Image (tube, helix red, strand yellow):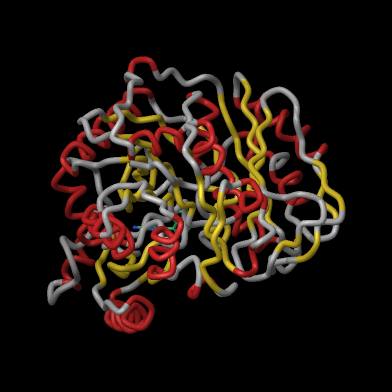
Amino acid sequence: MLSKLLIANRGEIALRILRAAKELKIPTVAAYSEADKDLMHVKMADESICIGPADSSQSYLNIPAIISAMELSGSDGVHPGYGFLSENPDFAEKVEKSGFDFVGPSASVIRMMGNKVSAKEFALKSGLPIVPGSSGAVDENVHEEAEKLGYPVIIKAASGGGGRGMKIVYSPEELDSAIELTQQESAVAFGDSTVYLEKFLENPRHIEVQVLADRHGNIIHLGDRDCSLQRRHQKVIEEAPALGIKEEKRQEIYEQCIEACRQLDYVSAGTFEFLYENDNFYFIEMNTRIQVEHPVTESVTGIDLVKLQLRIARDEEIKIKQEDIVLKGHAIECRINAENSETFLPSPGKILEYHAPGGIGVRMDSHLYKDYVVPPYYDSLIAKVICRANDREDARARLERALDEMYVLGIDTNLEMHRKLINDPNFINGTFNINYLENLNKEK
Ligand code: MV4
């Protein structure tokens, strides 16, 4: 049981996983693509193994190559990180069937949550509040249902998620064609034409709840995060806890998430995603992986989520009791990307000079080092800067200071955009929702 861990990911999260494994004295194997032999975690791992060409379809998404790498290296567990194969039920199943441990929940839970219709059906049954809409896939009553919900409505692909396969419908005349188009697009993109209907919420916030569960029936929540500031479905800034939610409302949604985990027999770290509007939570999806923004939760709880994922995979019990989890202050994370500030296009290349921020309350998760070459093949995240302080304003001021200290020369980054954004009055006041950043960019 996790006598050797294969890390099936790259970049900052691969390093994050390696660090957690080291603290648990678990030997590590870095599985890397031909473009990634110089990654920091590849150098630091006990062993490393090339799993294929740069193109992720032939390496980080190549299930047989990763299973072979586990066999060849004598690994008995795999951490998938986020993205890539982290929420691929066929991969989790293959790992399970090969007698290895997958650091995450069971393949069947991943499969259920991967289908947004079955995820919502489960959420409803378990007592979570869901966005009003069709019960299951759309059928011949869809016009009637849309009329009842009131326009605008949204058509979503059951196999979509993360913003892919959605269409907003403002009037009954557009409904049939929107359904057809979404069906066609999702058949091509996901090999599944199932679509469902929801009331479209116009200006919600995106709030999510972090949970952790072990194989012994212990389930805890680690509070919430606000991830409303996003651009094209890529989160830009996240924070914990979310602002302005009544304590009663918070406790209620936490209880509902824990109950849902109980009914799912959920194991490992997980996130319930909600839209939040007019004091109400509406479940949209569940993420069955560790998320990019997990450090804000770690910062306010003091709990190492990745280490606990590994311990849970080793069948250990979570020893932390819910009442011992006391949120300390506030944390904010900025995602630093290698991208052009005007076009938002990726900006790969060699890091000529580089300085990481430090000091009290500052955490930086990054795989960067001087002379590292950011490859063009993958997502452009190069660093996460996370600041914690006793209240939000102090965390924000600390973040401003940390971003001022930081520099990355040789490639374009969105550092300057972050420096501006955290000084935006609406960010300072917490008056934003999921549409805020995109509207701000349109104004320019
Ligand atoms: C919605 C919505 C409004 N109403 N559903 C986008 C990604 C996927 N996880 C669900 N998404 C949305 N679903 C209803 N009924 C608006 C979005 C949405 C969004 C949600 C969370 C964070 C950012 C977003 C950006 C655009 C749209």
Of the pair 386 and 378, the residue shown nearer to us: 378
Q: Is residue 393 left or right of residue 321?
A: right
Point out residue 154 in the picture as x, y percentages from the top left corner: 34, 66
Quadrant of image for the C terminus:
bottom right
Q: Quadrant of residue 342?
A: bottom right
Q: Residue furthest top?
A: 324
Q: Is residue 198 left or right of residue 289?
A: left
Residue 243 visible somewhere in the drawing: no
Point out residue 69 in the picture as x, y percentages from the top left corner: 45, 62
Quadrant of image for the N terminus:
top left
Identified at 38% across, 63% down, the residue is 67
Q: Compared to 192, does 213 lie above or below? A: above
Residue 194 visible somewhere in the drawing: yes
Q: Is residue 194 left or right of residue 303?
A: left
Q: Is residue 139 left or right of residue 52?
A: left
Of the pair 41 and 197, the residue shown nearer to us: 41
Identified at 28% across, 75% down, the residue is 172
Identified at 33% across, 35% down, the residue is 312
Q: Compared to 389, does 12 lie above or below? A: below
Of the pair 373 and 261, the residue shown nearer to us: 373
Identified at 25% across, 33% down, the residue is 258
Of the pair 333 and 313, the residue shown nearer to us: 313
Point out residue 109 in the picture as x, y percentages from the top left corner: 24, 52
Point out residue 189 in the picture as x, y percentages from the top left corner: 38, 78
